[in-house]
Every structure is written in C-alpha cells, then in structure tokens.
C-alpha cells in the first residue's frame, strides 16, 4: 500500500477487532507462573478429549503464524487475533533456545522478527551459520538462553509490505510453546471450545546435530498438557519426514508432512543420501509411503495448481485426488491477500502491497477439494469458504 491509502477491513476483521483484548508482556509472564493447569493435573480437560481432526470444518482455515496479515507473526497477539477472526486452527513454528526451551519463531534466525539488533549487549552474538545447506548471517535462538530471549520484543517481519503491522512492534515478547499451550487452555475455557494448534518442528536434523532435538521436547510438553492423543486438538508438521516418523513413535497426535517445490529434497533426505524429491513423494507410491506414518500433507499451493511462466494458474494436478485415495488430508500453504503473493490474474493495480482479488484466488484453490488452507488473513479465507459451502 502506498502512503496515504486506507485499507477498508473485511467484515470479520471489524468484528474481531471490536472484540479483541490486547495481550501485553504481563500476560505472557503471568502465563508462566506454575504448571498446575497442565492436563496431567486435570485429566478432564477438553484438550485431551476432543473429537479428532475429522470433526473440523472443511475447508479448515489455519491461521498462518496466527493472523500474520494483521499482527507480527508468532506472538500471543497474532494467535489471539486469529481466533477472534474465526480461524479454526492456529499455527506455531518451534525452534529451541540454548537451554533447551521450545519457542515460537518461524526461523531460528531472529534478526528480522525481533529487536535484537537494538540490543548492544548481544552485538557479539551476530554470526554466520549454515542451516540446511544455506549460509545465514544474524542472531540465532540457539545462542540465547530463554531468559535472554525474553528481553527481546517481537516485530513485523516484512514491514515494507505490511506497514500497518509495525504499529504493534515491541508489544509482545517471543512466546514459549508451553506458554502457548497454557494460553490455548485459557482460550478454550473462555470460548467454550477446543483450541486447535498446528505445530511445526523447524530444521529438526540441524538442531539434533547440536544436541537440541525437538521431537522429544515437544512430545514431553504434549503429554504434560494432554495433547498427545489421536483425538487431541493438535497437528504435528514438518518438512522433514523423519521428524514426523519420530514423533509418531512418541505420541499419537496426527502428523502432517510438509512438501515444498517439486524439485526440492527434504533436508533429512539430503543428509541420508535419499535421492527422492518432493516430486517423488506426491506420486501415488510416495503418498502411500507417507500415509504409513502420517495423516496428512501440507503441500505448497503450486503443487495443487501450478503456475505458468507469467505467474498465472494453470490446470490442477491430481494431488488432491491421489492424496485422498490414500486417506490423507491436504492443508496447503500459504494464501495471502497482497498482490505480490497472488497469482498474476488476481492482482489488481500496480501496488504490490495492495490487496488483490483474494476471493477469486481462494475460490480456485478451494474448488480443488483441499481439506484446508494456511492463510495469513484467516477472515478472508473463512468468507471464501462460506462462499463455497453456503455456510455463511
């Protein structure tokens, strides 16, 4: 959006904003006091006695990193706003601290999502690392204790595209996953329903090589809060199939294998010398292999409907049909409202940050029969789903 333009919020955005309660740092601190709310102490908690993922509305709308189209991602404010907008599920990405706590960040490099660069006491922590074969320079969660990380404040990751979100820079800290689990329990009581989470292990092979394995830590927390069962309101997801296989041996919660570009290879495949690519995994045989240990896949939207050289949508692939034939659900990622992220035919005007025809784009994707979709703007995705199903 160019300076001076004013975006008119959608109906659900207005309603959600009216009912939202701002969550400051004091909320996160208070949530950290004690563990008496853990499901091990309260086995009757709904978090462990739900109806399972097949009970979710279809298409399921997953708040991508919360409501990251409106608030800085992976903050309690973003998660809360996603629920206020009506999201059925809220996503968390997990990375560890040096002392082994799981925190919610899309990447372990926190240079662009926190104010760490403004902290002179951490200037010497800036370094270059190779993560999954890519050299990155910045500040990394595994070099900070949780206490140190809690001195930082979250900020908008793409401020040039989402200038309005910068209003909330500094309002929230980086939440631990345990704080999110307690938050979800409280929200469930307040709203009278289960709060579904979609939890990703980030770079699991990399962290295991550092002695910071994610799966065991995650499983321990899921068991503590009663979200380890097959019918618990949680999905476990990863771009590394071996991480989902490992989790399947630790807990019964449904697993989802994330799938990137067709020509790419999961990093655990690279390390193990497995020559298969994502293109191999989306064949009927590859999907059958995934279905032997997981309940779903999270493909990039381009694997559902490819784009041509001009960025326009072409003909849908057979992925939806083939995955369903193996009993797998599909939660593709990620839909965003801004022109810069939309297929070319749904862009409107010349401003890359302005909203395009997001409803037209969503209609094309939802009509393929996918079971859900990750969306930065959950309210838009919900309205599109209502248009498709007539539930509005």
Image: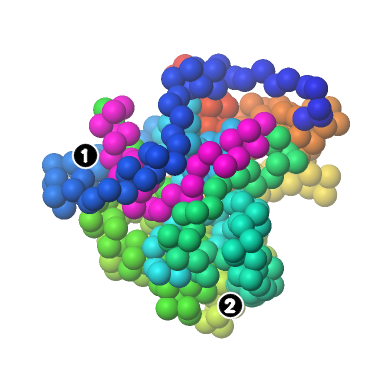
Q: Residue furthest bottom?
A: 273
Q: Are marks 2 and 1 in contact (CB under 8 Å)?
A: no
Nearest the camera: 27 or 229?
27
**Residue shown at the point (13%, 50%) measured from the top left:** 41
Asked whether 188 falls inside the magenta stretch, the response is: yes
Q: Secondary structure at mark 2?
A: helix
**Residue shown at the point (48%, 72%) measured from the top left:** 207
Q: Position of residue 11 (x, y in %)?
A: 55, 16
Q: Which residues are magenta?
A: 164-191
Q: Which mark is residue 306?
A: none
Q: Which residue position is annotated with label 1?
A: 46
- Camera sees residue 352: yes
**Residue shown at the point (55%, 80%) measured from the top left:** 271
Nearest the camera: 356 or 149?
149
- Camera sees residue 325: no
**Residue shown at the point (45%, 66%) measured from the top left:** 145
Q: Residue 236 sits in which quadrant?
A: bottom left
Q: Which residue position is annotated with label 2?
A: 270
The tag earlier along the polypeptide, 2 or 1, is 1
Q: Position of residue 34 (x, y in %)?
A: 23, 50
Please indicate whether residue 211 sits to the left or right of residue 155 in the image: left
Please indicate whether residue 45 sits to the left or right of residue 188 in the image: left
Name the chief secondary structure element in magenta.
helix
Q: Residue furthest front?
A: 121
Q: Residue furthest right?
A: 350
Asked whether 360 falls inside the magenta stretch, the response is: no
């Amino acid at each position: 959006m160019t300076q001076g333009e004013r975006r008119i919020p959608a109906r659900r955005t207005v309603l959600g904003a009216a009912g939202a309660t701002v969550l400051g740092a004091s909320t996160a601190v208070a949530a950290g006091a004690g563990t008496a709310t853990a499901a091990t102490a309260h086995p009757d908690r709904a978090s462990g006695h739900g109806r399972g993922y097949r009970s979710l509305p279809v298409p399921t709308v997953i708040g991508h990193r919360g409501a990251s189209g409106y608030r800085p991602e992976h903050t309690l404010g973003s998660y809360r706003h996603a629920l206020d907008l009506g999201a059925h599920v809220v996503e968390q990405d997990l990375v560890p601290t040096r002392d082994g706590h799981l925190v919610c960040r899309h990447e372990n490099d926190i240079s662009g999502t926190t104010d760490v660069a403004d902290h002179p006491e951490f200037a010497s922590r800036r370094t270059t690392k190779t993560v999954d074969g890519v050299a990155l320079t910045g500040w990394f969660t595994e070099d900070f204790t949780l206490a140190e990380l809690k001195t930082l404040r979250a900020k908008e990751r793409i401020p040039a595209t989402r200038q309005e979100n910068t209003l909330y820079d500094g309002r929230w800290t980086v939440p631990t996953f345990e704080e999110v689990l307690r938050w979800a329990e409280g929200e469930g009581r307040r709203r009278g329903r289960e709060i579904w989470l979609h939890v990703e292990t980030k770079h699991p092979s990399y962290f295991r090589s550092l002695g910071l394995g994610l799966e065991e830590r995650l499983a321990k927390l899921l068991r503590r809060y009663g979200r380890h069962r097959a019918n618990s309101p949680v999905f476990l997801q990863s771009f590394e199939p071996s991480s989902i296989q490992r989790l399947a041996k630790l807990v019964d919660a449904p697993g989802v294998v994330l799938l990137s570009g067709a020509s790419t290879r999961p990093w655990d495949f690279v390390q193990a010398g497995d020559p298969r690519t994502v293109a191999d995994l989306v064949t009927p045989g590859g999907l059958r292999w995934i279905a032997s240990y997981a309940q779903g896949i999270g493909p990039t939207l381009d694997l559902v409907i490819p784009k041509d050289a001009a960025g326009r949508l072409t003909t849908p692939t057979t992925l939806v049909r083939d995955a369903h034939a193996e009993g797998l659900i599909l939660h593709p990622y990620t839909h965003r409202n801004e022109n810069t992220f939309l297929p070319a035919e749904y862009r409107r005007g010349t401003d890359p940050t302005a909203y395009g025809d997001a409803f037209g784009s969503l209609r094309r994707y939802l009509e393929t029969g996918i079971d859900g979709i990750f969306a930065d703007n959950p309210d838009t995705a919900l309205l599109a789903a209502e248009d498709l199903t007539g539930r509005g």
